[in-house]
Amino acid sequence: MSPPRLAALLLRLVLRNQPLCEAILGDLEEELGRLRDHGSPPERPRIWYWRAILGLGARFAIEALPGGGRQSVSYTHL
């Protein structure tokens, strides 16, 4: 069973750095294979993969925002 294609597509849409994206997807696919070979119930590796993709996708989407997703706060003293 191969990694969920929709999940991989989601990461490719968010992460525009193609070499980095392919490296991450390759690492995730290797880990997915290890989880499957370990004898986990069939749904666990897929759930793990989706969680990893969604977490990475959120991180890279936030970093792509102006300011890296960090809002600057300024305080004034009265």
Image (cartoon, helix red, strand yellow):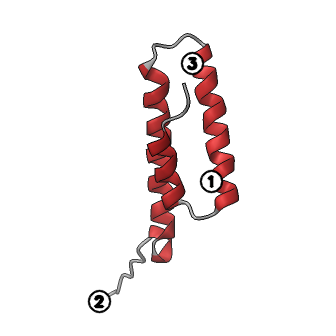
Residue at coordinates 66% horizontally, 31% vertically from top-left?
30
Q: Give the quarter of the image for residue 27.
A: top right
Between the C-alphas of marks 1 and 2, the distance is 48 Å
Residue of label 1:
21
Image quarter of the N terminus: top right
Q: Nearer the viewer, mark 2 or mark 3?
A: 3
Among numbered discs 1 and 2, the one appearing first in the sequence: 1
Residue at coordinates 42% horizontally, 21% vertically from top-left?
43
Residue at coordinates 63% horizontally, 63% vertically from top-left?
17
Tell me where residue 19 appears, x and y as whole percent.
Answer: 70, 57
Residue of label 3:
36
Residue density around tag 3, few if under 14, some if 14–19, many if 20 or more, within 10 Å = some
Say which amino acid is labelled 2: Leu
Residue in front for this viewpoint, 72 or 30: 30
Q: Give the quarter of the image for residue 32.
A: top right
Tell me where residue 60 appears, x and y as whole percent.
Answer: 51, 59
Residue of label 2:
78
Q: Are marks 1 and 2 in contact (CB under 8 Å)?
A: no
Residue density around tag 2, few if under 14, some if 14–19, many if 20 or more, within 10 Å = few
Between the C-alphas of marks 3 and 1, the distance is 22 Å
- Residue 66, compared with residue 2, is above or below; it is below
Secondary structure category for the residue under label 2: loop
Secondary structure category for the residue under label 1: helix
Say which amino acid is labelled 3: Arg
- Residue 27, compared with residue 45, is above or below; it is below
Is 61 on the left-hand or right-hand side of 76?
right
Say which amino acid is labelled 1: Cys
Is 75 on the left-hand or right-hand side of 17?
left
